[in-house]
């Protein structure tokens, strides 16, 4: 009876609310989301799931965030280049090696451009790659476990910005340097930059079965700034295109001095030709140092290997492999349309977009119609390669993505807008404001041969008044546009974490079915795993103590440990014996100088504790795992360093 | 729903208190507490049913995918050995042979439960504790410690059943 009362009251309240909403709409402006059906377009009802995954780079968070589209709901933050206390990534003994570099442990980076693996130029959803801009690194993240599996450091590079972009069969992930540097590094005057610094373009091969990365070769290009890049696709597969700026090779007051030339270049690199050259013994082996860190899903552990050598290629030694395409005004974005015919250079100090034609480029190369050279690299004539110009009327074009109907969408930073235009006719079809100062935009598959042109997400640099203020620091804002019709329609705003530079989207149906639910306990190859609770033990090796512990709802085995002494290094190796989806257990120890662990079903993770004080110290499970979660705790007795309390470990005794 | 939760809560508190009553260790601080719990423990049970762990429900096949199992009179020792290995890895954190632990000991379970019920309980403990009376009562009797779904296959579960026959 009571239930009915509630139900009736609820009905009445909703009716009232609905009615008053209707009235308000009647009085208010007609462009509110409720007035049209825009609310319905982004509404994913409770229990329903989104159409697309969106993977956004975290910028200075160093990580990737995973959102649903169209709802804008945040599903997960995947730790990549930054320590992540939520899961223990970069804190646990198993994952610390992931953040090793030739500079030692670097617990942070600036993550910019995620890119999903492709087969025949179409998203295949095996892995997502992302670059660390600051201490140049490339990471590979599994799209079945959503965990970072591999990080490779890039020597000779600095400001690893024109990365990480992959070729259309995931042959290579490509990473160009934004800052040119002396190669090899040496003590020299900064103002001798010009002619002496080099810009390294790194080609990292990807093993087709395992995804394993290998720095195949580095091209040592003139000392320009290699800003962004994209692979050729379809007819232009085999080529890679990089925008450059600072062809002036200035080394100070760059905002003036690197903007002097009317045109910089897009560098067109025939990577297939260079890969072949290297395969046949070409290139120079150079001594260097870089870390290669690999995480194994079966041992749940990472190893870091320091590599000592890289093959460098002097582009002038491979005639016909590299050309410069003059492109106006410090081009930033470098995007290739789904057919592979058009290479779009967005001169960030210009109002117009420059579109080069791949066919014209090939014809110009074959006709040897050069307009001089730069450091031995032929420069093609602007007019010979130009396919067209989009006269948009906007200011500060940055990036372009594509739909599946022959349209392109370009962001304009200075004039804060997205402009839709037609490939081939270069005609502007529509423009919509963004709020505010948009950087990249993303259409799922919008940098592949097969875009899914239903939504575009604009990633804005300035949030200002879009949300309730949270002090001077705010999350960046993303805007979602419906692009299924002739005109773009702004349908949603949502905050994003860190500074998403670029994003990669993919239909949910390509990923969701193969998303891993648990790690199988019988696949666990961790050297300190206990696969049945009777293997749980505590072993002392001098001052090192190894606790082989298991967990299941809701206890640790063992949960009472005695015989630990001040000054010991205690390693808790914890195996989660759950085999059910979404039942992690946590582990935290009082006074520990590191983060908690969050251990997924079937997984083993290790936490180091160095007890400093005599006493009886509790540990507990940090993840609310069951009705008896509050009971999931234990004690460690810590005795003085010279004590002779015997080492014991028990459960339920 | 709210009423239900409340009643369940009451029952759980009651059980927790009666558990306290069984406590044997007498330590200084616990004296008072024991006294008070004893009084409550004397209150008669709301019904006179046998505790779920001691009930014999051989007719009950439980809820789930296992509808009918015929056991061969001869125990398949090979299958039982496989079951023992799986039991050791997946179940011994909570089920010990020699004592009641987080959950009951599997010893003698076939004298109380049907083979179908046992397999359904292993394969989908959540469904069972929601829909099967005995499983529901066991959850309460065992302190609200929900049995974990270990994602075992029907074949693996069947081999655990065979292992239980040897106990």
Image: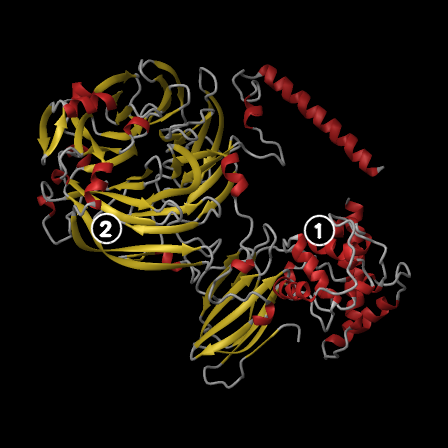
Tell me, yes or no, if residue A474 can be seen here: no
Q: Is residue A302 above or below residue A612?
A: above
Label 1: how many residues lie within 10 Å, few (<14), some (14-19) or many (20+)?
A: some
Quarter of the rendering occupied by the N terminus of chain A = top right
Foreground residue, A97 or A44?
A97
List x then y, in percent, for residue A473. Answer: 41, 41
Q: Position of residue A328 (x, y in %)?
A: 20, 24
With A274 as the anchor, is A479 left or right in this view?
right
- Residue A155 numbered tag: 2
Number of labels in the image equals: 2
Label pair 2/1, CB-CB below 8 angstroms: no
Residue A276 in view of the camera: yes
Q: Position of residue A149 (x, y in %)?
A: 41, 51
A44 is higher (above) or lower (below) than A88: above
Disc 2: which chain? A
Residue labelled with disc 1: B126
| Element class at badge 1 | helix
Q: What is the quadrant of residue A302 in the picture?
A: bottom left
Dot 2, how many residues are within 10 Å of its Cα: few (below 14), some (14-19), or many (20+)?
many
The residue under the point 17% across, 37% down is A224
- Name the residue nearer the viewer: A171 or A605: A171
Q: Quadrant of residue A9?
A: top right
Image point 56% across, 71% down: which residue?
A: A536
Badge 2 element = loop
* Distance in Å between CA atoms under marks 2 and 1: 53 Å
Query: On residue A477, which mark appears?
Result: none
Label 1 chain ID: B
The location of residue A395, given as percent across then percent down, is 29, 22
Q: Nearer the viewer, residue B70 or A213?
A: B70
């Amino acid at each position: 009876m009571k239930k009915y009362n509630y139900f009736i009251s609820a009905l009445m309240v909703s009716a009232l609310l609905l009615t008053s909403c209707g009235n308000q709409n009647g009085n208010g402006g007609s462009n509110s989301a409720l007035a049209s059906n825009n609310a319905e377009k982004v509404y994913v009802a409770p229990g329903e799931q989104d159409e697309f995954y969106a993977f956004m780079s975290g910028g200075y968070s160093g990580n990737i965030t995973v959102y649903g589209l169209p709802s804008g709901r945040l599903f997960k933050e995947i730790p990549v280049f930054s320590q992540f206390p939520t899961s223990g990534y970069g804190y646990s003994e198993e994952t610390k090696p992931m953040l090793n570099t030739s500079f030692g442990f670097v617990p942070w980076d600036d993550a910019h451009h995620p890119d999903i693996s492709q087969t025949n130029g179409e998203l295949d959803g095996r892995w997502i790659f992302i670059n660390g801009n600051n201490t140049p690194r490339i990471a590979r993240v599994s799209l079945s476990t959503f965990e970072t599996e591999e990080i490779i450091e890039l020597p000779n590079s600095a400001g690893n910005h024109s990365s990480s972009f992959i070729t259309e069969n995931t042959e290579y992930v490509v990473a160009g340097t934004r800052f040119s540097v002396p190669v090899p590094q040496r003590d020299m005057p900064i103002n001798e930059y010009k002619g002496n610094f080099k810009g390294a373009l790194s080609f990292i091969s990807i093993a087709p079965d395992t995804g394993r990365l290998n720095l195949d070769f580095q091209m040592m290009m003139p000392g320009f700034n290699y800003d962004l890049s994209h692979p050729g696709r379809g007819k232009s597969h085999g080529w890679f295109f990089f925008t450059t700026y600072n062809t002036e090779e200035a080394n100070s007051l760059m905002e003036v001095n690197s903007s002097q030339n009317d045109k910089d270049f897009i560098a067109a690199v025939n990577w297939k030709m260079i890969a072949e050259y290297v395969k046949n013994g070409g290139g120079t082996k150079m001594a260097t140092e870089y870390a290669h860190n690999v995480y194994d899903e079966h041992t749940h552990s990472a190893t870091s290997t320091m590599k000592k050598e890289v093959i460098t290629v002097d582009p002038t030694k491979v005639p016909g492999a590299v050309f410069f395409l003059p492109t106006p005004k410090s081009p930033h974005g470098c995007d290739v349309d789904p057919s592979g015919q058009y290479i779009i250079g967005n001169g960030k100090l210009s109002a117009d977009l420059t579109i080069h034609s791949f066919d014209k480029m090939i014809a110009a190369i074959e006709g040897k119609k050069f307009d001089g050279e730069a450091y031995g690299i032929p420069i093609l004539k602007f007019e010979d390669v130009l396919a067209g110009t989009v006269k948009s009327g906007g200011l500060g074009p940055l990036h372009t993505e594509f739909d599946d109907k022959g349209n392109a969408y370009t962001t304009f930073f200075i004039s804060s807008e997205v402009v839709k235009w037609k490939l081939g006719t270069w005609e502007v079809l529509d423009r919509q404001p963004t709020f505010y100062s948009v950087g990249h935009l993303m259409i799922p598959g919008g940098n592949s041969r097969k875009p899914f042109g239903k939504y575009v997400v604009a990633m804005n640099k300035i949030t200002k008044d879009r949300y309730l203020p949270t002090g001077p620091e705010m999350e960046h804002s993303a805007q979602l546009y419906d692009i299924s019709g002739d005109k773009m329609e702004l349908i949603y705003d949502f905050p994003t974490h860190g500074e998403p530079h670029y994003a990669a989207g993919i239909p949910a149906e390509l990923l969701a079915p193969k998303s891993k639910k648990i790690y199988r306990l019988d696949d666990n190859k961790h050297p300190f795993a206990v696969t049945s609770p009777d293997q749980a033990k505590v072993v002392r090796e001098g001052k090192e103590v190894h606790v082989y512990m298991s967990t299941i709802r809701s206890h640790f085995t063992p949960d009472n440990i005695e015989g630990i002494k001040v000054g010991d290094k205690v390693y808790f190796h914890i195996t989660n014996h759950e085999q059910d989806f979404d039942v992690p257990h946590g582990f935290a120890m009082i006074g520990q100088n590191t983060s908690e662990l969050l251990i997924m079903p079937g997984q083993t993770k290790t936490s180091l504790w160095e007890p400093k004080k005599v006493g009886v110290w509790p540990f507990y499970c940090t993840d609310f795992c069951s009705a008896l979660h509050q009971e999931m705790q234990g004690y460690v007795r810590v005795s003085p360093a010279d004590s002779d309390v015997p080492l014991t470990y028990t459960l339920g005794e | 729903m709210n009423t239900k939760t409340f009643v369940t809560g009451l029952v759980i508190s009651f059980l927790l208190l009666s558990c306290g009553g069984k406590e044997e260790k007498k330590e200084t601080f616990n004296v008072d507490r024991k006294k008070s719990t004893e009084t409550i423990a004397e209150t008669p049970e709301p019904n006179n049913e046998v505790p779920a762990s001691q009930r014999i429900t051989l007719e009950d096949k439980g809820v789930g995918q296992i509808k009918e199992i015929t056991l061969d009179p001869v125990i398949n020792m090979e299958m039982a050995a496989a079951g023992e290995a799986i039991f050791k890895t997946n179940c011994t954190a909570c089920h010990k042979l020699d004592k009641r632990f987080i959950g009951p000991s599997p010893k003698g379970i076939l004298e109380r439960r049907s083979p179908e019920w046992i397999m359904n309980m292993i394969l989908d403990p959540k469904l069972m504790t929601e829909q099967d009376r005995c499983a529901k009562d066991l959850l309460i009797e065992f302190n609200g410690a929900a049995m974990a779904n270990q994602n075992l296959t029907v074949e693996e579960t069947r081999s655990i059943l065979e292992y239980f026959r040897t106990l």
